[in-house]
Image (cartoon, rainbow, N blue to C red):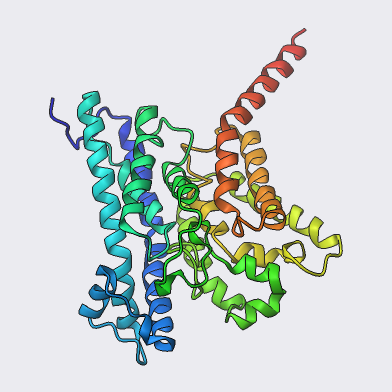
Amino acid sequence: MAASLAPPGGAVGGYARILRLQLLALVPVSIAAVLNSGYQYLAVLAREPERMGNDLRSNLAHGLGAGYDDPGLYDWLAAGLAHFLPLLLLALVIGGLWERIIAARCQRAIEPGFILIALLFTLLLPGSAPFSHVVYGMSFAILLGKGIFGGDGKTFLSPALLGIAIVQVSFPSAAGQHPLWQGLAGYAGSDAVALFHRGGEAALAQAGIDLWTAFVGSTSGTLGTTSVLAVILGAGLLLLNRVISWRLLLAQLVGLAVVATLFNLTGADTGASSMPLHWHLLLGSFAFAAVFIACDPVASCCTNPGRWIQGFLIGALVVLIRVANSTHPDAVIPAMLLASIMAPLIDHAVIAWNIRQRGRRHV
């Protein structure tokens, strides 16, 4: 039985609308990813031109005319596209291939959710990620994160999060000599939190990181996670259309603020425990993951109390891991994964508590 792109049933129309809005919300993030990756790539080459590689992406950037000597908007755009598009296209091809195999095997239509998974997975990658890692991670994302649960809307984990977590665990020390790997702790994300851990705000300033550059996104990091401004634009669209829960988003900020403040009040002068709240918000991939991963309507709690609990847990875990475990300097991926795994349990506990309370009122 041939697979078809036509969605089965009228109920899929609502999911298709949500999918379109999620992809639209990722447009400003993708634009920021392209421009910043191009900027970072050319900035390093301007300082160290001998690091120019001979790989596909470097050759493509050179072929598009991206120059590192006094680069402008076109140069950043060309160099960024040379790194972003090959990763995204490969992720789409691998995701689409597995989706077609699963659809044919299960005798159902091809579901378009793999497009969103591929884009999110790509935005969580460094611009220099090996193509073999993309194939590996996307295969896990589609097979274990989506296909094994029955398809779109039936999983309790974000497939993109699962895919990037598998790559991070499998290649923990992955770091090549490509310029885009500067300022990164492999697939764990930005090294900015580790910088603060070692030398506080002075270390950030020495690396050229201030509040404005961290907010706009002209800092080193994985492709789509550096610009808080772009994330806010996407979050606004999703909130206005009620695609994501404001309770879950706010609870993450509350959890981050409470635990960060508690550590600040301990009086520690060094390390991530002294990091103020605004740096926890601006550094690393917390803002991106809080909106596009944790607030995924499929992979998050569906009860309002559960959303408050899960969100607070995410924010708290991010700070705790950043302070206590330097091997995960960004801490966002393990925190999101742990909270996502617990989401069904949290909902079950909330529902059981509500049933018990109603039973007591009718005794």
When asked about the image quadrant of residue 260, the answer is bottom right
Residue pushed farthest top?
Answer: 363
Is residue 215 left or right of 279 when viewed as pictured?
left
Q: How many marks?
A: 0
Is residue 13 left or right of 352 when viewed as pictured?
left
On-image quarter of the N terminus:
top left
Q: Is residue 36 visible?
A: no
Q: Residue at x 28, y 44 (%)?
A: 95
Where residue 357 appears, as percent x and y from the top left, is 73, 18
Q: Nearer the viewer, residue 40 or 115?
A: 40
Q: Residue at x 56, y 29 (%)?
A: 344
Q: Residue at x 66, y 20 (%)?
A: 352
Residue pushed farthest bottom?
Answer: 70
Where residue 166 appears, as percent x and y from the top left, is 45, 45
On-image quarter of the C terminus:
top right
Where residue 67 appears, as percent x and y from the top left, is 30, 86
When asked about the image quadrant of residue 345, the answer is top right
Is residue 328 left or right of 136 when viewed as pictured?
right
Q: Is residue 10 visible?
A: yes
Q: Nearer the viewer, residue 233 or 119?
A: 119
Q: Nearer the viewer, residue 198 or 50?
A: 50
Identify whether 168 is placed above or below 182: above
Identify whether 314 is placed above or below 53: above
Where residue 59 appears, as percent x and y from the top left, is 24, 75
When asked about the image quadrant of residue 286, the answer is bottom right
Q: Residue at x 42, y 67 (%)?
A: 176
